[in-house]
Amino acid sequence: MSDSQTASVSSAAHNPALLHHFATEEQQRDSASLGMWIFLSTEVMFFGGLFCAYLIYRLKYFGDFAAASQTLDWKLGATNTAVLICSSLTVVLAVWAAQQAKRAVLLGSLVLTLILGFAFLGIKSIEYAEKFEKHHVPGPTFQFDQKVPGHPDQQASPGHAQIYFALYFVMTGLHALHMIIGIGIFVWLLVTAWKGRLTPEYNTPMEIGGLYWHFVDIVWIYLFPLLYLIDLHK
Amino acid sequence: MVTATAQPVERENYLNKHYGVGSWLLTTDHKRIALLYLASITFFFFIGGFFALLIRLELLTPAGDLVQADTYNKLFTMHGMVMVFFFLIPSIPAVLGNFLVPMMIGAKDLAFPRINLLSWYLYVIGGVMMLHCMLTGGVDTGWTFYAPFSTAYTNTKIVEAGLAIFVAGFSSILTGLNFVVTIHRMRAPGMTWSRLPLFIWAHYATSIIQILGTPVVAITIVLVAAERTLHLGIFDPKLGGDPLLFQHLFWFYSHPAVYIMILPSMGVVSEVIACFSRKRIFGYSFVALSSIAIAVFGFLVWAHHMFVAGISVYAALIFSLLSYSVAVPSAVKVFNWTATLYKGSIHYEAPMLYAFGFLGLFTIGGLTGLFLAALGINVHVTDTYFVVAHFHYIMVGGALMGYLGGMHFWWPKISGKLYPEGWARLAALIVFIGFNLTFFPQFILGYLGMPRRYYDYSHMPEFQVLNVLSTAGATILGVGYLLPMIYFLWSMRYGKPAPDNPWNAAGLEWQTASPPTTFNFEQEPVVTWEAYNYEEIDSVEKPEVHVVG
């Protein structure tokens, strides 16, 4: 590190994005990227507590969780999974385009990413609305009247189902909140790119914004099978 | 050993470069942010201390005469919440760490100065929420806010207190994130990992806990707030939820949180003991890596808070064993510090007195921790004053002694003024005596069976003598804490100007001006020596300063 630091001090004066306390652009970029990775590790722990709670109750109340899970529409969930995977592709394209100075591709990919992000939230809100209609939202009005899958004579416990839906709403709700924040970041990136401030020399915001977006996608990749696909083969 | 060579007062430094409220509230200078933190945590320390005073006054007599049960429950709850989340956790990292981490590694600032300022604002927002919560009714669940009492039964302000802690938690995460990136990416040329001061190693380990632990308690608080407002059922046994899950999630952070408090203190003690023994720290790499080991082991012991809560005996057995394992790296530190003292040329300046105090109190606190890790004794003393005494020996005797020692050690650097040494030594002595008088009787009380969190012990009047001793000690301790605040403030105006290196100490922070300029160093330092090269420093008149030409 020390060699590169002293070597490229002279180039520092050229880049207005280089902050005063960094010696080189490379040091600044590495710091930003490491900072985002560490932030994502806190996010892993943040969601980790929820995944842990989910797994405990799913093992404890498997039949009830399967019954509750099967009221979800897996087709909508799968569509949303596809939407997010496509958005990860457009994010990768945007990062590449910023590095290669391909302005049209960069702007196009960012717009596509935003469209896909909104599509995800739109589908999610359709799903949420359905939960309200069916009284599957935890709270005083909660109702649940389903059989345990594979046991036609066994009524699923409404209490346990409510825990499932509580976890469903907290986990997908937090995920959706991260999506909304991600959309905010990408709107800002779009403005920054429009003004021509993302260049092959300086595209750190695009890179770490992309890291964040991929992380939020990955969370969904875990949420989808855990919440939608319990015991479906019966 | 103070060699006062008067400095011209007018020299430009980080304190006098800019003036006005705006220059402080919008600063991104890590040193100024450290001072913002210093003022805020001192404020909360005295609020927490005020609650402690009321608790001790109530316990002066066996009957509940000063306050009634509800008020008493709120007093110990608010004392715990304020002291843990708004004083101890930010104390050394956010004040001394903020000030010193960049300077010790030869950087101009932390990697993310604006995030650093954001973390202070988050702390202040959390603090204001906590104050509002306290003024409008407070919380009575104990600082642990156990479900289902917190989620279904109590009528106090759980959600608001929880949100305050949630916000303050993000401040803590951002501080840790900033430190880790700074330590990885901002070291000066030649400042290799094996040359880092142990203060840096301690803060690196602390940051790991802040980064990995705090989010878990944050999501737990979200769940408590959601459970309380929306009745989700996650912690409600009526619906099949498990209150034990709350305890697991809570202690997964809140046990390691103890190491957030004690590790930075250990970093301070390593610096102080090396300096005032005029020796390289014995077993440098062991002391450095034991910090990491404490951070790692610290994540594997949380269920020892739950031995009587109904976890399986096999789980209890394993957690008991794992809890013992934390003692190994802790003992490595204590033995290495002791070995550093051996044949050292020891100076009894005030910071060193605090370091000595730390050694004794941390050892008692740590050893009684082993008592508590043992299943049999744990069942006997769970929820008694034995536990209260144990964790105060760690969190006050350990963490706070380190904090005060560090404040004295680096005060000349921070303020550019010398504090009055005689008063400081007296205060160190008062704190040590007051502390032991407050908390040692509580070990005996707990062992005899006095439960914690009781405001009235009139059915056990024989406990009064020990309680009176404890209250008397707390009064002395309070004086011991007021003194440094008074003479630090006094020294800012009337203190003698501090030389750049009043202790003739090793470390980059001493090779720049007191107080430092805004960018810390005139030129980027290049490190060519090992940490704690006291033999070298003392063999030549002046340490050689290498700078880039």
Image (tube, coloured by chain):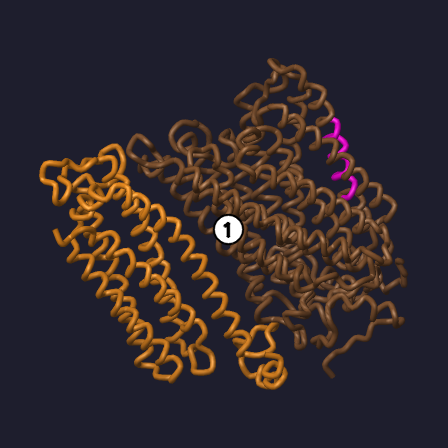
> Image check: B116 left or right of B162?
right
Q: Quadrant of the C terminus of chain B?
A: bottom right
Instruction: State the hue of chain B.
Output: brown
Residue B56 percent location from the top left of the image: 67, 26
- Chain bearing mark 1: B
Q: Amino acid at mark 1?
A: Phe
Residue B181 percent location from the top left of the image: 55, 66
Residue A226 to residue B306: above or below: below
Q: Residue at x 67, y 38 (%)?
A: B46
> Image check: A2 left or right of B540?
left
Residue under circle 1?
A: B299
Residue B45 percent location from the top left of the image: 65, 40
Quadrant of res B238: top left
Count of labels in the image? 1
Q: Is residue B198 magenta?
A: no
Instruction: State the hue of chain A.
Output: orange
* Most frequent secondary structure within the magenta stretch: helix
Q: What segment carries the magenta color?
A: B472-484
Residue B118 percent location from the top left of the image: 54, 56
